[in-house]
């Protein structure tokens, strides 16, 4: 149906006027931008729009703060800001060298030089440069933080507000992470576009740590509102303060960095929304939608094709499907359940051009056995006889119907789902195939009741009680438990239901012999599993300890060669599977559905920012004229 | 009056105790319903412990819930020093802001539905009471029970599927097949035959008229593409306006009052005379201006009725004022309908006007009328879902209450005095039958603020209900308590109001 222009009512006229002024501003921006950089053709189709659904409202333009760290914010900021690298759908880390480059200058000490390309600007035409990177380091390393809030036990009130106001407190989600290893103030190159970071000790996932978040100049301007600083002065003020470690100046900057970017409706001061990427947020209504408009003059990255992307907030998965069928949104990624798949497969939905792809998520379900609770899997139970405990563990894992669980619980949602065979690497990521071919997971590929019985007999153990922990209200885990209980019974295991709503707080308590839950992978970094498998680390919740695994992870922390990293991971995994640590079962299924009559180029991806990752390849169909 | 005051104070005292006990139980139960750190515990972030420590500190999770309640209560009690504090949610947002936004969103959604449900419910209930054991009574009773027992999520999904998606599909190429037309005709025929009283012959005639009439009307509307370009026009406006004027006269003073009838019809003429000027200035109309226009035309009607009313000028003025109001509604409705086509054909809508989620079309900036249509298309479905289920209850209550009154002695006296049936019903029975309804309505208003959890979820409204459910899922204690505090206060306050109003309305009841 052809779109006709509506009658020119007054409101429409106002809108036109607004748009004219926006065009004037944009033209001005383009002229300035063009004078500074090489021309890159923009493929944005004027008037093209697309509407995407997400389940939570945007609430902070700084997703590096501990409050603002949520996918609802990160997705929007991914559309608005460029980064040094991003994950594609494989998943694989891709560098965006049109925006900036980074190179390892030295291995010892680990030294990385980040450089922003000339001509890269914020949407207010201020150049993106080392000052912005310096702020990112200062904030996320948390090295300048000299106060922490303390709370009154009785009232919950912050008791040291005055101190907090005077002191520096960057409320970063990365505090205590890898960037905190950079205690030396980074150096800025002469042209002001490079920053060199020197790590105190080698950090294997350095490539994933650093990016530019919010702009330096706006943050400083927010901190010193009454001084009306120019962008250049604001950057200088920041750099001087960092060089001199001037708490008096850094304190308000830290407060602005931590809190000024939190808003749920369009802020009056739109400078808070300056972006350095393909889009800029032009409208924001709490719990309703965020609209991003393509920036004129954006050349440091593949050009997007769609002028306006609106992200609507639809929390209910089925409501998202009907909204998609009714043409209100064009791409959805609802929480995946069998009901949603049925709804998307309905003929009247399919006939509207709706298609969907089931993709595995980066969260994977696994079963861990407890090694240190004097339970059936602990050698202490058998008087320190490790061989006996190992046989019991192996016997138990042999009874777990992994394929059956995937077939019954995951395949209805994702027909292509496979059993996950690696404790350390996501399927599809580099090295997964090599690792699973050799790590010994094949021992547990199929249920082997006879083998399990033989192992138990060999160990001289019969009638083993296994206390099994999971979250009671999680239907999928309850179903998994039922399947395992039934299968393990055949080999003589008595699996006892110890489900608990507070299962999370029971992790590591030793009150259970086996637990089923999921780890969320947010990156392909290798250091994530160090904490899980190394002796005594934070995520090592079952008392597992193996010198070879410890050694492998010790080496991997300083091993920068990807091929050798994979080899080390394989070494660790061989031990894990040989020790019958536990088993991995499946990746959480994810669903992305879209309207093929309205959008092309959607490719779901397992890691954040999910299907948003290739937004520049999206093309809008059939709505080229904006009313 | 003293007893009255002490009654209120006593009630308030009890209320505070109830609130304290209820919030305490709620707090502890919610705190033990799950683990607010669950998402962090399964995280593989390097600085996981630090993140957990921070959240523990932010939300005082290291304090036992039985005691942590008092930390929360301390924030609430700071109300008295002007620093009302409901704490923060897991994302560090202020709960007072969240609850404030959620209340306004919920009120927007539920008020209209409740108001319409009460009006229609009471009207139909009273009609069925007056026609007790008639076909109409039985049909309404049957429908009321069906609607009353429908699960709201199911109704919501049906509405989305057929009214939104189905009707939008229909609008792409408006054409109704004969089977559908026949079905519409039969349903309409049964409906009218159910309402109209009479013998079998009359029944058949009513059925036939309704059957052919509805088919002819629908088919005509399809032919003139009315569904994509709706409007009323002056001629139909005159017919509808006159009909409304006569109906108002009949209920208000009775059609035999020729003076009132003519003055009501004059309001229709005034509305028609204003038709073109109204359309010319309508672009500059804002919500406030529209309200002022309504008030002005209603007042004009009242003034005309008062001056030319003769003997019972108050009753005539009332009639004329109502007619003036109704006619203004017809004129504005026509104006809204004119905004339909530009709205529906704009690229924001792409010819699919009926929405299934949210409260507005993103980025739509346009005239008051187009925005009004946008609100309508978004409110229609959730309102219908709430309405269908809500009004059935009111029908039953209103019917029972009216039946009881109609059997009272004073009604017999009124009839014996020779009053006509309209006066007996409208002045003596109807008013008294509303007394028990006030209690019900007060309770329901308290329920409104609690939100319609399912309706809000299904239609993507972020009101009180969805705030509660989403927070409960994450064991996010402070927003849950913020929700609970507000709704429980509203509930007890409206309970109190219901008691007081009851005693004021019914002289037989005294507070003590």
Image: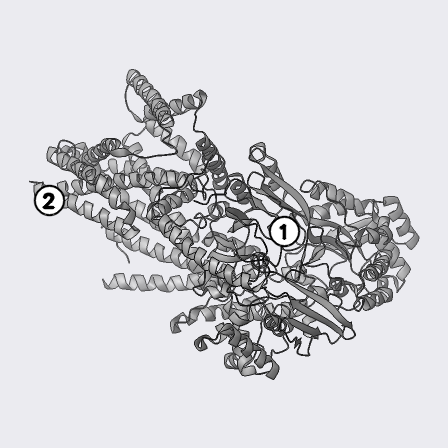
- Residue at the spot x=69%, y=75% of the render? A182
Q: Nearer the viewer, residue B163 or A457?
A: B163
Q: Which residue is mark 1?
A: A614
Q: Among all residues in the image, which is located at the extreme top?
A: B201
Q: Residue at x 38, y 23 (%)?
A: B185
- Provide the chain ID for the residue under circle 2: B
**Residues behind callouts 2 and 1 on a single chain:** no
From what the image shows, is residue B352 above or below residue A166? above
Q: Quadrant of residue B403?
A: top left
Q: Secondary structure at mark 1?
A: helix
User: Which quarter of the figure has residue A128?
Assistant: bottom right
Few, some or many C-alpha atoms within 10 Å of disc 1 (few <14, some 14-19, many ≥20)?
A: many
* Total numbered labels placed on residues in the image: 2
Q: Identify the image quadrant of the C terminus of chain B.
A: bottom left
Image-based side of B486 in relation to A313, left or right: left
Decide if residue B53 is in sight here: yes
Q: Is residue A5 above or below residue A361?
A: above
Marks 2 and 1 sit apart, C-alpha to C-alpha, by 71 Å
């Amino acid at each position: 149906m052809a779109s006709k222009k509506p009658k020119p009512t007054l409101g429409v006229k106002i809108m036109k006027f607004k748009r004219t002024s926006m065009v004037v501003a944009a033209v001005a921006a383009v002229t300035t931008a063009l004078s500074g950089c090489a021309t890159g053709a923009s493929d944005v189709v004027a008037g093209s729009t697309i509407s995407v659904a997400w389940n939570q409202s945007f609430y902070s333009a700084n997703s590096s703060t501990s409050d603002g760290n949520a996918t609802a914010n990160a997705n929007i900021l991914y559309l608005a800001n460029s980064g040094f690298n991003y994950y594609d759908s494989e998943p694989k880390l891709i560098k965006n060298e049109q925006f900036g480059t980074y190179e390892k200058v030295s291995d010892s000490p680990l030294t990385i030089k980040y450089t922003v390309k000339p001509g890269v600007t914020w949407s207010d035409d201020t150049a993106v440069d080392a000052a912005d990177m310096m702020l990112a380091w200062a904030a996320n390393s948390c090295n300048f933080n000299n106060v922490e809030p303390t709370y009154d036990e009785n009232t919950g009130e912050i008791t040291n507000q005055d101190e907090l106001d005077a002191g520096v407190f960057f409320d970063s989600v990365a505090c205590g992470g890898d960037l905190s290893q950079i205690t030396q103030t980074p150096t800025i190159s002469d042209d002001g576009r490079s920053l060199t970071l020197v790590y105190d000790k080698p950090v294997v996932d350095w490539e994933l740590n650093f990016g530019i978040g919010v702009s330096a100049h706006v943050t400083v301007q927010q901190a010193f509102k009454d001084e009306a600083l120019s962008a250049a002065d604001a950057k200088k003020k920041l750099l001087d303060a960092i060089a001199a470690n001037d708490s008096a100046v850094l304190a308000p900057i830290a407060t602005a960095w931590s809190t000024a970017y939190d808003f749920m409706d369009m802020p009056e001061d739109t400078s808070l929304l300056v972006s350095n990427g393909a889009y800029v947020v032009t409208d924001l209504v709490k719990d309703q939608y965020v609209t991003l408009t393509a920036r004129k003059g954006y050349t440091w990255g593949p050009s997007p094709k769609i002028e306006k992307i609106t992200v609507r907030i639809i929390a209910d998965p089925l409501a998202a499907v009907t909204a998609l069928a009714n043409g209100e949104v064009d791409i959805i990624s609802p929480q995946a359940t069998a009901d949603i798949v049925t709804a998307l497969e309905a003929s009247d939905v399919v006939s509207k051009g709706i298609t969907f792809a089931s993709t595995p998520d980066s969260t994977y379900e696994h079963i861990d056995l407890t090694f240190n609770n004097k339970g059936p899997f602990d050698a202490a139970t058998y008087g320190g006889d490790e061989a006996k405990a190992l046989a019991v563990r192996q016997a138990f894992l042999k009874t777990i119907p992994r394929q059956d669980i995937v077939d019954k619980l995951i395949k209805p949602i994702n027909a292509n789902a496979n059993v996950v065979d690696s404790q350390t690497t996501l399927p599809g990521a580099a090295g997964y195939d090599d690792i699973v071919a050799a790590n010994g997971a094949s021992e547990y590929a199929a249920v082997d009741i006879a083998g399990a019985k033989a192992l138990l007999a060999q160990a001289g153990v019969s009638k083993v009680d296994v206390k099994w922990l999971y979250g009671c209200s999680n239907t999928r885990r309850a179903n998994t438990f039922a399947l395992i209980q039934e299968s393990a019974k055949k080999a003589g295991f008595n699996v006892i239901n110890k489900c608990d709503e507070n299962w999370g707080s029971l992790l590591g308590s030793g009150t259970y012999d086996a637990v089923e839950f999921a780890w969320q992978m947010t990156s392909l970094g290798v250091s994530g599993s160090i904490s899980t498998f190394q002796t005594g680390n934070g995520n090592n919740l079952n008392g597992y300890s193996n010198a070879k695994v410890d050694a492998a992870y010790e080496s991997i922390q300083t091993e920068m060669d990807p091929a050798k990293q994979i080899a080390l991971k394989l070494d660790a995994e061989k031990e894990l599977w040989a020790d019958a640590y536990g088993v991995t079962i499946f990746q959480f299924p994810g669903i992305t559905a879209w309207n093929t009559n309205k959008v092309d180029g959607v490719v779901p991806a397992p890691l954040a920012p999910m299907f948003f990752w290739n937004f520049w390849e999206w093309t809008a169909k059939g709505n080229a004229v904006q009313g | 009056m003293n007893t009255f005051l002490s009654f209120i104070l006593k009630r308030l005292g009890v209320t505070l105790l109830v609130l304290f006990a209820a919030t305490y139980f709620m707090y502890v139960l919610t705190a033990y319903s799950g683990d607010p750190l669950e998402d962090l515990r399964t995280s593989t972030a390097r600085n996981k412990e630090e993140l957990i420590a921070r959240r523990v500190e932010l939300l005082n999770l290291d304090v036992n819930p039985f005691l942590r309640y008092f930390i929360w209560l301390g924030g609430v009690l700071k109300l008295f020093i002007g620093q009302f504090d409901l704490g923060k949610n897991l994302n560090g947002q202020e709960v007072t802001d969240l609850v404030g936004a959620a209340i306004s969103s919920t009120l927007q959604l539920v008020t209209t539905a409740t108001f319409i449900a009460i009006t229609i419910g009471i009207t139909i209930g009273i009609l069925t009471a007056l026609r007790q054991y008639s076909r109409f009574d039985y049909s309404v009773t049957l429908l009321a029970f069906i609607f009353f027992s429908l699960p709201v999520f199911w109704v919501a999904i049906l509405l989305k599927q057929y009214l939104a998606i189905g009707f939008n599909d229909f609008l792409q190429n408006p054409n109704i097949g004969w089977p559908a037309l026949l079905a519409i005709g039969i349903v309409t025929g049964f409906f009218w035959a159910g309402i109209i009283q009479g013998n079998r012959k009359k029944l058949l005639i009513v059925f036939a008229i309704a059957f052919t009439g509805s088919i002819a009307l629908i088919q005509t509307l399809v032919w003139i593409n009315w569904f994509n370009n709706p409007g009323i026009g002056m001629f139909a406006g005159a017919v509808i306006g006159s009909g409304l004027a006569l109906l108002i006269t009949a209920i208000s003073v009775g059609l035999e009052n020729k003076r009132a009838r003519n003055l009501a019809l004059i309001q229709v003429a005034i509305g028609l005379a204003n038709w073109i000027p109204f359309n010319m200035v309508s672009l500059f109309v804002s919500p406030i201006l529209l309200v002022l226009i309504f008030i002005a035309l209603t007042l004009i009607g009242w003034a005309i009725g008062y001056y030319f009313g003769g003997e019972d000028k108050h009753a005539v003025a009332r009639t004329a004022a109502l007619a003036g109001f109704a006619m203004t509604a017809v004129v504005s409705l026509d104006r809204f309908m004119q905004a339909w086509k530009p709205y529906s054909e704009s690229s924001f809508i792409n010819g699919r006007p009926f929405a299934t989620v949210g409260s507005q079309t993103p980025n739509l900036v346009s005239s008051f009328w187009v925005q009004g249509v946008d609100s309508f298309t978004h409110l229609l479905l959730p309102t219908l879902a709430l309405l269908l289920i809500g009004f059935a209850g009111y029908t039953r209550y209103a019917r029972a209450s009216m039946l009881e009154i109609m059997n009272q002695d004073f009604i017999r006296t009124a009839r014996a005095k020779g009053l006509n049936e309209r006066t007996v019903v409208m002045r003596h029975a109807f008013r008294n039958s509303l007394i028990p309804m006030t209690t019900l309505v007060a309770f329901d208003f308290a329920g409104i603020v609690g939100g319609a959890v399912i309706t809000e979820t299904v239609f993507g409204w972020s009101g009180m209900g969805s705030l509660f459910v989403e927070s409960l899922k994450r064991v996010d204690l402070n927003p849950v308590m913020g929700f609970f505090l507000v709704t429980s206060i509203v509930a007890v306050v409206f309970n109190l109001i219901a008691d007081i109003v009851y005693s004021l309305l019914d002289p037989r009841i005294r507070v003590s």
